[in-house]
Image (cartoon, rainbow, N blue to C red):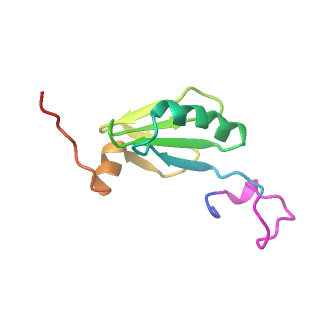
Amino acid sequence: MRNGITAERFPEDWEEDVACSVPPNLVIEIISPEQTFGQLTAKARDYLDAGVLRLWVVDSKARSITVFYPDAPPQIYMGDTLLIDSLFEGLELTAEQVFNQAGITTIISSS
């Protein structure tokens, strides 16, 4: 994979010193405090329409990763649910692993 794009997606005559016209296989969007999940959901369609094969929307408040596909409904991964994707051979992780590795701790609200 080169810059998030598998070699098969590049045209044969592509030159490395020119702008890349091939969309990446994966885009990861992290919801910022100013954004809503709904805003990124609308943006997901734009990515998929542009040829992106996977979009991960990472929500640190919900501690979830929502994976958008061009040909299937989105799937939400939380906790120890294993995220496996045939597009990324050998990739196996959980949302919990991602948040723990990033040092994002669970926020417990008091009622």
Task: Work out whether 91 lies above or below 17.
Answer: above
**Residue 108 in view:** yes
Q: Quadrant of the image for the C terminus?
A: top left
**Dividing the picture into quarters, in which one does residue 21 lie?**
bottom right
Q: Residue at x 64, y 43 (%)?
A: 53
Between 90 and 11, the residue placed more toward the observer is: 11
Task: Work out whether 20 lies above or below 26.
Answer: below
In the picture, measured across the screen, residue 21 lies left or right of residue 79, that is right
In the picture, measured across the screen, residue 92 lies left or right of residue 102, that is right
The boundaries of the magenta stretch are: 5-20
Q: Residue at x 32, y 56 (%)?
A: 102
Residue 82, x across and y down, in percent: 38, 40
All told, the count of numbered labels is 0
**Residue 85 in view:** no
**Dividing the picture into quarters, in which one does residue 14 lie?**
bottom right
**Residue 10 included in the magenta stretch of the image:** yes
**Residue 38 included in the magenta stretch of the image:** no
**Dividing the picture into quarters, in which one does residue 1 lie?**
bottom right
- Residue at far right of view: 13
